[in-house]
């Protein structure tokens, strides 16, 4: 291992350039995750269910190709290291794909549009993985000093989460001057041109100083672990069902466009939600002292559902400020709901170590990552299906800038997707936790046993050294 | 199965799943389906209106909105640089109780009320003050429920949502340069179908789109939504520096739209809906 663990290797420039690389990658993924559905349905005029099927297939494919990329990266030997070549050479195609995703090919036949949708989204998946997996792994290799690595991860994650919202800010700004088609095309161009610059700068600037110590995780190892560790299984099943909750953020752009008829209001709905969510994250540690993870999850889920139900009852025929304010309160528990599954995952790791003596973080977090992608796939498919069910009218693209009027039934349906549907269905995520037994008392006993085991093995190791 | 085999299988599966999205139903099948849906919709719609007309007492509130691009140069088919839209909002309340009727129309600051008996106006008030009842033709203020040629239907759908059934349909009528107004299926200036329907804007003056949404509750008309869009053909000229020529292209843009949403109520029990005095 290169150098001393206490020496400082990273300069301020390294933190800045790597964080900007994270910002850039998050900006592309935030744009794609937030606005592709409305682009395909309301600009290209593709039926929502067709879009939903595409998302379902491609996002599951995306979840499965992460470990493949992990293997490729692990086997790479180059003078730039293992991770950096993929970020450097993958960034430009990634940026080009970001632009192509939002090209308004409205005058083409419908079969070409569907093919184009599949082609560009799969390319986005592939280049997103090519850049994203090494970008996630790079902080682990940049310094032998673990404090520096932790700081880099922490700073770049915060900057990355800001990058996630950059498309939201640009969308709200551009919609004040441009129609939907040109807004999305312009944002695609801005982000597609700038993102590769920051990605390449970050990758070129930050050096790989230590070889990766992570074992190669196979997806089959993940599934074996999942079915053996029943506590982890029930937690993952519960977490998988939280995709209903994500309908709220996914439907905001439809709410502002088709209920309030003002795309610029996107920021007025999404940003308070993001702020509320961050505030919720700050409350989580304090609440964790009084409640265990399961209780915290159930309480936050019920609060979120009740608050969304209140928004539904108040309705959308009130001033948008009222709806936005109510949504702020409804989103407060979401921060807790974002943090608690990780705490539960760590508890299940402790449980497994206590039971078997093995600690399998790599496998655990690989399954969590796959779960996240599968949840996202289900969410997009379900949202698309709901739009079709509520008779969402797609534009006729032979009419310039056509935006058909939506039926009242459709408007009500969009508001239901935003409120009461996630409010009711989100409660389903509590059901698998019936089988989750790791309460405060149980975890206390497990941690005590683990602490004694670790102490005993440390003493044995020290005693062995003294001899 | 080895890794390569798995990857090939996955790619074939993805390809097989994408094919349905890229394949359209043949034209004959598409239009046969449309005709069947159209005939069913018109039958449902006419049935609902007949049932409504047979009711001795009911009421409806209707909101009406229209927008018109006032500075569109229809003669030269030119869109203005800066668009000016005239927007109108109107609300209507209509009550029928046996032979008695009541109509209230609010448009801007003016509120008109008409009381009818046996179809004749017996009392008229404007902003609460009595007005000349002969000056008002009640048929102008009642809402007419249009129907159209089912052959013109573009699409339709139906949904059951708890106790409600929602049915929708769309009509496209093409007005060509010879000023014939035809359903799109009969116009020589349309091509393609479904999402690929396109118009020859050079030979068309306008396309009128009418969308109808019918909501039935316990078999009775609960809501009727009528949306119209007027899409006018216009000319775009762009000077091409490389060829020193002006390229002319034709496209269709919305120059007007209306929205009418009518919600119906029926008396509970045997009594009728009371008419305000």
Image: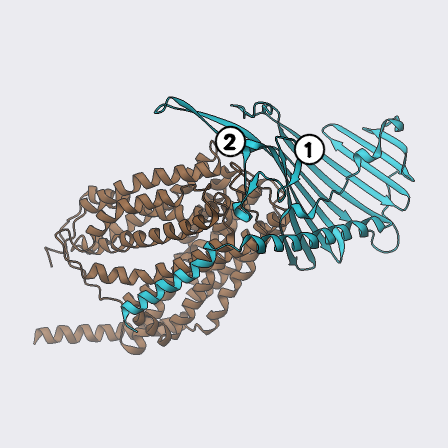
Chain colours: A brown, B cyan
Q: Which x, y percent locates residue A38? A: 48, 46
Chain of the residue that carries numbered disc 1 in the rendered image: B
Residue B185 picture quarter = top right
The residue where tag 1 is placed is: B89
Task: Kindly state the secondary structure of the residue where label 2 is placed.
Answer: strand
Give the quadrant of the C terminus of chain B. top right
Q: Residue at x 47, y 55 (%)?
A: B23
Give the quadrant of the N terminus of chain B. bottom left
Q: Nearer the viewer, residue A342 or A176?
A: A176
Q: Residue at x 42, y 64 (%)?
A: A293
Q: Which x, y percent locates residue A415? A: 58, 49
Q: Are marks 1 and 2 in contact (CB under 8 Å)?
A: no
Q: Nearer the viewer, residue A436 or A73?
A: A73
A303 sits left or right of B49 in the view: left
| Location of residue A208 with respect to A235 vertically, above or below | above
Tally of numbered discs: 2
């Amino acid at each position: 291992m290169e150098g001393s663990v206490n020496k400082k290797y990273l300069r301020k420039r390294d933190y800045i350039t790597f964080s900007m690389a994270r910002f850039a990658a998050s900006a592309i993924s935030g744009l794609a995750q937030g606005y592709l559905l409305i682009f395909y349905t309301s600009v290209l005029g593709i039926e929502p269910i067709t879009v939903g099927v595409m998302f379902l297939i491609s996002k599951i494919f995306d979840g499965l190709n992460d470990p493949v990329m992990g293997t490729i990266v692990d086997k790479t030997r180059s003078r730039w290291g293992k991770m950096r070549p993929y970020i450097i050479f993958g960034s430009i195609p990634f940026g080009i794909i970001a632009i192509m995703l939002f090209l308004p090919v409205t005058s083409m036949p419908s079969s070409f549009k569907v093919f184009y949708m599949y082609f560009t989204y799969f390319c986005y998946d592939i280049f997103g993985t090519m850049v994203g997996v090494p970008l996630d792994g790079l902080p682990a290799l940049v310094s032998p000093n673990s404090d520096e690595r932790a700081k880099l991860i922490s700073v770049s994650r915060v900057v990355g989460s800001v990058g996630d919202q950059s498309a939201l800010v640009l969308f709200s700004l551009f919609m004040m001057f441009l129609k939907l088609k040109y807004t999305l095309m312009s944002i695609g161009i801005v982000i597609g041109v700038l993102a590769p610059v920051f990605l390449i700068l970050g990758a070129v600037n930050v050096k790989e100083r230590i070889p990766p110590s992570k074992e190669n995780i196979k997806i089959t190892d993940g599934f074996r672990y999942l079915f053996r560790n029943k506590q982890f299984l029930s937690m993952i099943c519960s977490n998988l069902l939280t995709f209903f909750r994500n309908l709220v953020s996914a439907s905001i752009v439809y709410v502002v466009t088709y209920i309030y008829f003002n795309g610029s209001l996107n920021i007025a709905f999404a940003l308070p939600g993001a702020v509320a969510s961050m505030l919720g994250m700050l409350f989580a540690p304090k609440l964790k002292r009084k409640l265990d993870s399961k209780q915290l999850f159930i309480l936050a889920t019920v609060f979120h559902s009740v608050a969304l139900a209140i928004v539904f009852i108040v309705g959308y025929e009130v001033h948008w400020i009222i709806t936005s304010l109510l949504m702020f309160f409804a989103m407060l528990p979401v921060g807790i709901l974002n943090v608690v599954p990780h705490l539960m995952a760590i508890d299940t790791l402790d449980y497994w170590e206590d039971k078997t003596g093995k600690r399998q973080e790599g496998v655990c977090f690989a399954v969590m990552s796959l779960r996240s992608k599968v949840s996202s796939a289900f969410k997009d498919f379900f949202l698309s299906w709901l739009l079709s069910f509520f008779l969402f009218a797609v534009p006729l693209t032979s009419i310039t800038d056509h935006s058909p009027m939506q039926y009242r039934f459709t408007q009500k349906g969009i508001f239901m997707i935003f409120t009461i549907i996630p409010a009711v269905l989100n409660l389903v995520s509590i059901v698998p936790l019936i089988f989750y037994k790791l309460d405060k008392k149980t975890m206390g006993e497990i941690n005590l046993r683990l602490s004694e085991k670790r102490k005993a093995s440390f003493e044995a190791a020290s005693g062995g050294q003294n001899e | 199965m080895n890794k390569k085999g798995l990857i090939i299988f996955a790619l074939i599966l993805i390809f097989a799943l994408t094919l349905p999205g890229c394949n359209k139903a043949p034209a004959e099948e598409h239009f046969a389906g449309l005709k069947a849906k159209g005939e069913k919709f018109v039958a449902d719609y006419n049935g609902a209106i007949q049932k409504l007309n047979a009711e001795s007492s009911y009421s409806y509130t209707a909101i009406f909105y229209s927008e018109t691009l006032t500075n569109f140069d229809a003669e030269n088919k030119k869109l203005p640089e800066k668009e000016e839209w005239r927007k109108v909002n109107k609300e209507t309340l209509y009550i029928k109780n046996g032979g008695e009727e009541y109509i209230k129309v609010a448009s801007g600051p003016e509120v008109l009320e008409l009381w009818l008996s046996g179809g004749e106006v017996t009392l008229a008030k404007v902003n609460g003050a009595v007005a000349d009842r002969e000056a008002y033709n009640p048929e102008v203020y009642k809402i007419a429920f249009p129907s159209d040629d089912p052959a013109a239907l573009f699409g339709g759908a139906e949904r059951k949502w708890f106790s409600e059934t929602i049915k929708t349909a769309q009509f496209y009528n093409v007005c060509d340069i010879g000023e014939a107004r035809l359903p799109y299926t009969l116009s020589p200036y349309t091509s393609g179908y479904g999402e690929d329907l396109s118009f020859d804007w050079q030979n068309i003056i306008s396309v009128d789109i009418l969308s109808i949404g019918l909501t039935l509750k316990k078999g009775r008309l609960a809501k009727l939504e009528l949306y119209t869009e007027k899409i006018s053909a216009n000319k775009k000229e762009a000077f091409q520096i490389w060829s020193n020529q002006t390229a002319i292209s034709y496209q269709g843009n919305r120059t007007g739209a209306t929205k009418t949403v009518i919600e119906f109520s029926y008396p509970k029990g045997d009594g009728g809906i009371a008419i305000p005095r």
